[in-house]
Each structure stands twice: as C-alpha cells, then as structure tokens.
Image: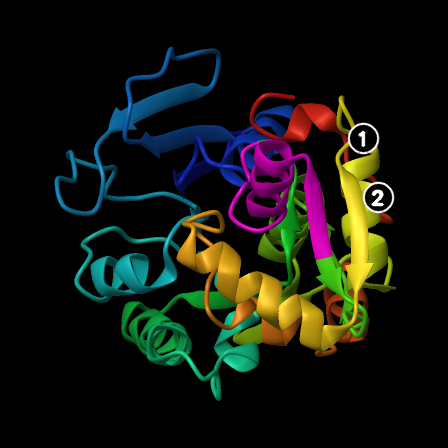
C-alpha cells in the first residue's frame, strides 16, 4: 500500500505537533513546515520557513493541513502551485464572537477570519479540491498559551487572580489533541467537504469554574478572589494604571460575562468528533 503524503503548515505548533504524530501513526508521509529547524524522522521531513520566507514545498500531496494563521494560509493557497485533493484548515470561533466587539482590533480580527474562510473555499474550488474549515473554541494544551496561559501568567505574577462576581459566561475549552484528531478524521470524511464546523470542547462550564480548575493545578496555587463588579472595575483601572495587567485585551473582561457556546453536533455527525472534558495540567503552561 502506497503511503499518503500530507503537507502540514504550523506543524510544530500546539495543534500541529499532535496532528503530525497522528498522521505518522496512521501511515502518512509528512512534510512539515516550521520556523525553526527540526530533526527529521521516519516518514517525517521538515521545511524551515514561514509565509514571509517559504522554502520550496512539494508540488503534489494527498492533503494539506493548515494549523497556523488562517489569513496567511488562505493567501498562500489562493496562488499555490501545490495540488492536493483535500485541504483541512483551522480558523477560530472568534470570527463570530468578536464581530461586534468594542475593540477595533478584535473586530478587524473577526473580519480577517471571515474573509480568509471565503478565500479558502474560493481557492479550493479553483484548484478542484475539497476544503474543510474547522473553528475551535478556546484551545488549551501544551503550547496553547494565548488564552488560559494569559490567566496563568497574571495569576503567577500577582499570586492572585480576581474575577467580577458576574463572570459566569459559559465556555467550552478544547484540547489541542482533540483538534488534531478532528483534522485527521475530517480529511477522510466526504460529509466534511465544503463545510465549516465549530469544534467546542466536550464540557460546558462557566468562566469562574474554568479559571478555578486552571489555578488548582499550579504550584504554588494562586488565590482566586471574586469581588462585586463595581469594585472589580475600580481595581482593574488601578491595575492598568500600574501596568500590572499587560496583555489583557480590552474586550476580555466583558466576554467573561458572555456565553461563548457552540454546537458540536454537525462535526459529530460528519466525522465522529468526540472531544474530552476540560482537564488542565500544570505542564501545559510555561513554568509548569
């Protein structure tokens, strides 16, 4: 049996690493793209570069996986000479949750994601390929420090994490390995071709519970304090003035109160998507 060949963008990232492992275990030959040099292995060849400085890539393969920035991948794919019958790309549910955000940067991000999705499917039609767009919710796992990692970093620095009493917006954190499994399943699912799927985690919990479980795995364990919303607003302004909450996006606090919940049913029906519950570990975060 001839091995299938996959080209994986973002192959060393949070989703790309477990996806490469799953592809190799399933007998695929993998061509991975990474910014840094990586050691090759059986069935695995690395290409060093990024979208600004792409190295020569295979012209033909059986599938292309994009585990990095969707907007940059879609621009490359629109003019790419690489022929592949299947393309599976990751976007984000931020294309929906941030469309009406107060922060202009977050609204712009939502717009870029939507435009990139449209470009992806248009390019796939031009190439005669079947595209699938996967939209995860809040991603966690080793190397996925953009969301929960920000909370962990702030809590470790201050020894405490403070939430407003009304921070009960529901969340569905999804592990990066569940996303890798979804990509591998989707590439062989005819029902996934030409479709967009939300990929939430297997458990829905409110924001405070998500933070409490995350802090509980840390040593030493930061305190979690809940204060009335007006007092939280005053404390946040003071913390901003003192430079103690660097990296906290303007809309992040408002979204603590919002339900960001998506339906996994279509992905379950199309390719058997079955994510696990939220189980953070200290090793997932820098310094853990």
Residue 21 appears in the picture as rendered? yes
Q: Does residue 148 belong to the magenta stretch?
A: yes
* Distance in Å between CA atoms under marks 2 and 1: 7 Å
Q: Does residue 30 belong to the magenta stretch?
A: no
Q: Viewer-proximal residue, 206 or 116? A: 206
Circle number at residue 217: 1
Q: Viewer-proximal residue, 136 or 60? A: 136
Q: Position of residue 76 (x, y in %)?
A: 22, 58
Circle number at residue 152: none
Q: Residue at the location (70% across, 47% down)?
A: 161
Q: Residue at the location (57% across, 75% down)?
A: 195
* Highlighted magenta segment, given as a residue range: 143-162
* Residue at image mark 2: 213
Task: Using residue 232 as the reference point, say whether residue 252 is left or right of it.
Answer: left
Q: Position of residue 75 (x, y in %)?
A: 23, 64
Residue 119 lies in quadrant: bottom left
Task: Using residue 210 as the reference point, say whether residue 60 is left or right of it.
Answer: left
Label 1 crowd (10 A; few <14 / some 14-19 / many >=20):
some
Q: Position of residue 218 (x, y in %)?
A: 75, 28
């Amino acid at each position: 049996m001839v091995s299938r060949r996959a080209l994986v963008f973002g192959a060393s990232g949070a989703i790309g690493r477990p996806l490469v492992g799953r592809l190799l275990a399933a007998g695929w030959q993998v061509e991975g793209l990474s910014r840094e040099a990586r050691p090759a292995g059986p069935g695995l060849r690395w290409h060093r570069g990024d979208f600004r400085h792409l190295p020569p890539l295979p012209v033909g393969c059986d599938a292309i996986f994009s585990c990095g920035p969707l907007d940059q991948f879609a621009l490359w794919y629109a003019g790419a000479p690489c022929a592949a019958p299947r393309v599976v790309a990751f976007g984000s549910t931020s294309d929906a949750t941030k469309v009406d955000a107060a922060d202009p940067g977050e609204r712009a991000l939502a717009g870029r994601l939507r435009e990139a999705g449209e470009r992806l499917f248009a390019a796939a039609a031009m190439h005669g390929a079947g595209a699938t767009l996967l939209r995860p919710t809040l991603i966690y796992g080793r190397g996925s420090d953009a969301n929960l990692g920000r909370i962990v970093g702030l809590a470790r620095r201050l020894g405490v994490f403070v939430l407003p009493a009304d921070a009960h917006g529901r969340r569905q954190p999804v592990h990066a390995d569940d996303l890798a499994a979804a990509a591998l399943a989707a590439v062989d699912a005819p029902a996934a071709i030409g479709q967009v799927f939300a990929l939430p985690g297997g458990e829905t919990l409110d924001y405070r519970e998500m933070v409490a479980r995350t802090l509980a795995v840390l040593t030493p364990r930061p305190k979690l304090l809940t204060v009335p919303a007006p007092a939280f607003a005053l404390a946040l302004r003071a913390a901003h003035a003192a430079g103690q909450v660097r990296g906290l996006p303007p809309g992040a606090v408002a979204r603590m109160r919002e339900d960001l919940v998506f339906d996994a049913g279509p992905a379950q029906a199309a390719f058997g998507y079955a994510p696990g519950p939220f189980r953070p570990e200290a090793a997932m975060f820098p310094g853990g």
